[in-house]
Amino acid sequence: MTYSRFVFRLLWIALVALQIPCLTRGQQPGTQLPNGRLLGEVPGKPREINNLATAAAVSPDGRFAVFLHSGFGADTDDGKQSLSVLNLETDKLSDFPDNRLPHNARQTYFLGLAFSLDGKHLFASLASYTDPLGKKEGSTGNGIAVYRFDNGKVTPERFLPISPRTSLPQGKARRTEFNDVTYPAGLSVGNVAGEERILVACNNSDEAVLLNSSDGKIVYRFDLSTYKRIPAALPYTTAISNDGKWGFVSLWNASTVAKLDLARGRVIQKIPLSKPSTAFAGGSHPTALLLNKENSVLFVALTNRDQVVALDPRNGKTLYALSTKPSGQTYGGSDPQSLALSPDEKTLFSANAISDSVSVFDLAIHRAAGFIPTEWYPTVVVATSRDLLIASAKGHGAGPNSKSNGKKADGRPQYPYVLGLIRGSLARLALADIFGHLDAYTKEVAERNTSRGNTDRVTFATGENKIRHVIYIIKENRT
């Protein structure tokens, strides 16, 4: 490198440093994420768990909360996906890696987790694209893993395979690479016609299936396709009414929620939710579903609209909509992923993955009362009888991978893969304490989400914003 080029680079680095926004008054220092947001101390005393929790279930007796981890698998969990169990009475946290789910397995957890009605079993969806029929050694194919659950201990018991979809509606065609792939996603368990049954969203076959929990027999298959090609609607998760008559399925790529008659095996309504104006625009991406106790309101997270909508499940009409954007945030990007209701059903919580926050909605006035700061990428929120549980997929990030964990075949040192270094986290907050601290929590969320849609409020070291153009270079480094 020539001397002049070296000096130029030093000057360029110095100039860029002058333009970097500094912490505003009252903002706490912390870990800065690649997206510019800040991580710092959060309420609930987060503890490390396996990464990427995508679903949770509370035991019918209210003693345990179980979290499903569908990520790469942290090194501390032997590189496997797992179920973690929190004893709500003793606060003991246990982890149960599944030997069928190392990082190179042909199947994976995805979204589905639910207790049996008697609390003695857990059902988890296992999805496979590379070996959908489970023909190879160590493969399960697509289906439901059944675990025995005994006083907080999880033991694999059996597997309920889901057979491929063989019948297609007239005029529709399946993409050949998905011929045998159902890819079960979210699921729910209910008493349907006097039998315990599992309603499963099949993400890659554009259908939902209703199974007997005892033997896995498919009672009904529900066609949820909305386009000529299958898959395209991409069913995400499900909910079952308390009386077992109705089922609901969020269709992620169709901006729709489907209502099912579970007794007769029919799709009786498709409810459009903030559909895009053109075929090329992004949809609203309905994800999490939550029914209240009386089944009079169905809450739906619209992940790509930063909203939660409340529907009347009887007719599909929208009752009201709730914004998940942090206070003062003009542009989008909160990304609601999970929903929970307080025991008295006066408060709704939404885990917002991108804004690293949980929205706290006062349902009496149909708007956010405030926000709770979280660790990195909260994906699951659960309300128990006394506590609010928040699982963040990435916790505090990865950290350095400079410590060798063995040697390669040629004798060179081997270092851990960055995804194996990421640990998730689980925070536990007392519901009774949240509103007393909510103003401070809300201010913290606003400060950490520094992009508020008003650049005039960002403080620059030079006193003014001299940035006129931004060049965004996208490059994936896999070395």
Image (cartoon, rainbow, N blue to C red):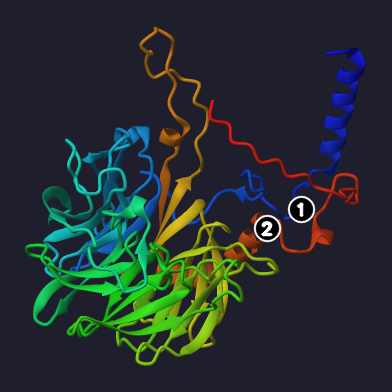
| Secondary structure found at label 1 | loop
Instruction: Evaluate if marks 1 and 2 touch, with contact meaning CB atoms under 8 Å apart.
Output: yes
- Residue placed furthest toward the front: 171
Residue 247, percent from left and from top:
28, 79
Residue 348 appears anywhere in the view: yes
The earlier-in-sequence mark between 1 and 2 is 1
Q: Which residue is mark 2?
A: 447
Q: Quadrant of the C terminus?
A: top right
Q: Amino acid at mark 1?
A: Thr
Above or below for 48 versus 125: above
Element type where label 2 sits in the image: helix
Tag 1: Cα neighbours inside 10 Å, few (<14), some, or many (≥20)? some
Q: Which residue is mark 1?
A: 24
Q: Which mark is residue 1?
A: none
Q: Is residue 6 above or below residue 320?
A: above
Q: Going 84% across and 49% down the picture, which residue do you hit?
A: 469
Q: Quadrant of the N terminus?
A: top right
Estimate how packed mark 2 is, as few (under 14), some (14 to 19) or many (20 or more) residues with alpha carbons within 10 Å. many
Horizontally, is 128 left or right of 194 in the view?
right
Provide residue 213's location: percent of width, then percent of height.
12, 66
Residue for point 38% across, 13% down: 407
Measure the alpha-carbon separation of dots 1 and 2.
8 Å
